[in-house]
Image (tube, rainbow, N blue to C red):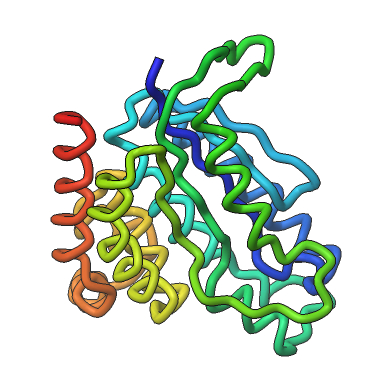
Amino acid sequence: MIKAVISGDIVASTSLSDAGRELIEDALKELLEELRKRFNTYARIFRGDYLECVVPKPQDALHVALAIKSFVKSIPVEDTPGYKINNRVKLFKTYGIRLAIGYGQLSRYNPKEGIIDGEAIYLSGRTINEFSTYSKERIVIKNTLFFVSNDATLNKEFEPLIALLDVLLSKATSKQCKVLYLKLMNNNEEAIASKLKIAQSVVNQHSTSIGWNAIEKTVKYFSEVIKNH
């Protein structure tokens, strides 16, 4: 069966305070439950900063990946006790989480027993482990969003789109990312304004600044290509 698996690790998580890491782990659990309800995903967290997420409908994979990335970047770790800004923490605030979408076969998949095995998870996992920041003294980050499959043509088609999305999100503020996440979870601007207790004009401004129109079109294009693959 063809599936998409998203693997991800929090950038420079070991440099955050204990309270910050705890906040991230709790927030991830909340996020993954929301994604389960919305996309029927199955996900699990390791060490508090590494996740694996199976997306049953592969065409939803980019949508889910962007929801994860924007959500993580919006987590207010600066509000936690012991928060201190340094170069590694700045990397977390800039990139949040590194994600790889693996697209391919899953030979075994049983959410009830926690079994995920096959090409898709190997592809995503290898990509993330190759660039992992866990326990590294020096972190050099070039990319934080990847698509990998055994189809070279498909990889080549998505590479520039993924790279552009990566740049957009790395330049986005935490407030813009919060608005993006809520939009990706199918909230309109009026509802977002109510949730965040801000004016709808501010929501629109954040949406425009982060490039929502381009992101929405790219997510739809990805979905159409994968459905027709």
Q: Residue furthest bottom?
A: 86
Instruction: Name the one closer to the observer, 123 or 150.
Output: 150
Residue located at (33% from left, 61% from top): 162
Horizontal and vertical percent position of residue 160 = 27, 65
Does residue 14 sit above or below 226 in this rendering?
below
| 79 horizontally vs 72: left or right | right
Residue at 23% across / 35% down in the picture? 226
Quadrant housing the C terminus: top left
Name the residue nearer the viewer: 213 or 158. Answer: 158
Quadrant hosting residue 168: bottom left
Closer-to-camera residue (5/154): 154
Above or below, 116 against 137 in this view is above
Q: Relative to residue 218, is residue 39 drawn left or right?
A: right
Q: Residue at x 47, y 51 (%)?
A: 68
Residue nearer the viewer, 119 or 100 = 119
Which quadrant, please, contains the N terminus?
A: top left
Report x, y in % for residue 83: 77, 79
Q: Name the quadrant containing residue 137.
A: bottom right
**Residue lying at 61% horizontally and 21% vertically, measured from the top left:** 117
Is 206 on the left-hand or right-hand side of 102?
A: left
The answer to whether residue 145 is above or below residue 84 is: above
- Quarter of image, res 125: top right
